[in-house]
Image (cartoon, rainbow, N blue to C red):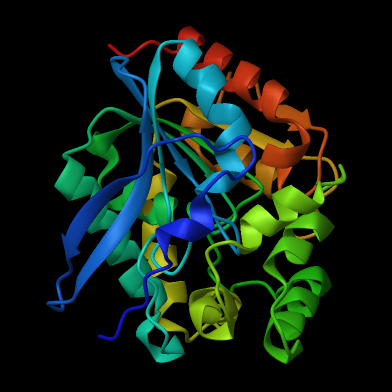
């Protein structure tokens, strides 16, 4: 598999992102060798895993990492393959839903992570929830925010199809502008440029371009069936589960109610509707951190 690697110089002096890089060398089940970047801050006994989605990277969590570390947690925020400082296959055919799950699984295994509190948004949920379903013993708690686990049993929303079509038709995929359109607050020019930093040119954006096509929207999609099987496990999940969906995201609106209805672990938890757009980490990072901390404190392990 051919791989691209963004030069380190692209990540110098990004606003509010002082974190030292960490790398894991992955050997996936198909024999591919890839390097995956992650932020690793704090040394608390509790491990918080923050999973980003499309087309963001760990920069999305820059305003949440320090407060969560200050609260006493170890905080990890990986860059998915194809994003951030992680390796980027330039061939779109090298990206698949299954491979993304495998790459994230390899990373968890390499770091030997256990007792995880998962916070997942966007594709972070499509990937992370598959791992929760297959390895529930590895996770202590789950927080879902503006995400879903699609089974294609219902037609996709107009908002999602509009995004899917745009992502394929636009000549130059404007990562920073896409993030801005998913936020309520106005990002600075420097922040938008930081979201663009991993992508030297369109070849580096193959993963970002491909992600919208990997969401299963047809019932006979193999990954739709795998997700149905995952749901048979998740509807039995009784460990603490919190929803923190925003009030201004047309793509995932109402998804919080579905989780609360179906997941036993959601019962009795302090679910909140947060003020923000799709990328609520940009709009309400302080509120998110407070809600996560309260959730963990109210649901101690053991």
Figure disc tally: 0
- Taking depth in this image into account, of 208 and 3 the one nearest to the observer is 3
Residue 189 horizontal side relative to residue 16, left or right: right
User: Left or right of 18: which side holds 87?
Assistant: left
Residue 180, horizontal then vertical, whole percent: 80, 56
Q: Please tell me whether residue 28 is drawn above or below residue 105 in the rendered image.
A: below
- Left or right: residue 7 versus residue 115 is right
Residue at the (19%, 42%) spot, across then down: 111
Percent of width and height locating residue 192: 73, 55
Look at the picture and state if 192 lies above or below 30. Answer: above
257 sits to left or right of 180: left
Judge whether 220 appears above or below 188 on screen: below
Residue 154, percent from left and from top: 67, 72
- Residue 81 lies, in percent from the top left, at 38, 65
At 32% from the left and 79% from the top, the residue drawn is 3
| Rendered image quadrant of residue 223 | bottom left
Determine if residue 84 is in view: no
Q: Quadrant of the N terminus?
A: bottom left
**Closest to the observer: 196 or 127?**
196
Position above or below: 154 against 171: above
Q: Residue at x 24, y 68 (%)?
A: 34
Q: Quadrant of the C terminus?
A: top left
Answer whether residue 268 is visible to the viewer in this image: yes
């Amino acid at each position: 598999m051919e791989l691209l690697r963004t030069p380190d110089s692209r990540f110098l002096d990004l606003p509010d992102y002082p974190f030292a890089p960490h790398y894991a060398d992955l050997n996936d089940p198909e024999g591919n060798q890839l390097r995956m970047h992650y932020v690793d801050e704090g040394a608390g006994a509790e491990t918080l895993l923050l999973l980003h989605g499309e087309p963001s990277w760990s920069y999305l969590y820059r305003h949440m990492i320090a407060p969560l570390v200050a609260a006493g947690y170890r905080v990890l925020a990986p860059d998915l393959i194809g994003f951030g400082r992680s390796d980027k296959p330039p061939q779109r055919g090298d990206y698949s839903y299954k491979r993304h799950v495998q790459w994230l699984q390899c990373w968890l295994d390499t770091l030997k992570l256990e007792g995880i509190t998962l916070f997942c948004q966007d594709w972070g949920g499509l990937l992370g929830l598959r791992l929760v379903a297959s390895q529930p013993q590895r996770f202590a708690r789950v927080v879902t925010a503006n995400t879903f686990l699609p089974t294609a049993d219902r037609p996709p929303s107009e908002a999602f199809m509009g995004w899917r079509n745009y992502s394929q038709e636009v000549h130059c995929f404007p990562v920073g502008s896409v993030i801005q359109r998913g936020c309520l607050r106005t990002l600075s020019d420097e922040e938008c440029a930081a979201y663009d930093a991993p992508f030297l040119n369109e070849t580096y954006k193959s993963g970002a371009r491909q992600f919208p096509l990997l969401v299963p929207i047809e019932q006979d999609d193999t990954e739709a069936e795998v997700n149905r099987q995952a749901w048979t496990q998740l509807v039995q999940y009784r460990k603490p589960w919190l929803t923190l969906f925003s009030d201004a995201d047309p793509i995932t609106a109402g998804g919080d109610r579905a989780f609360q209805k179906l997941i036993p672990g959601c019962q009795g938890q302090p679910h909140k509707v947060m003020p923000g757009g799709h990328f609520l980490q940009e709009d309400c990072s302080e509120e998110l951190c407070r809600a996560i901390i309260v959730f963990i404190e109210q649901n101690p392990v053991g």
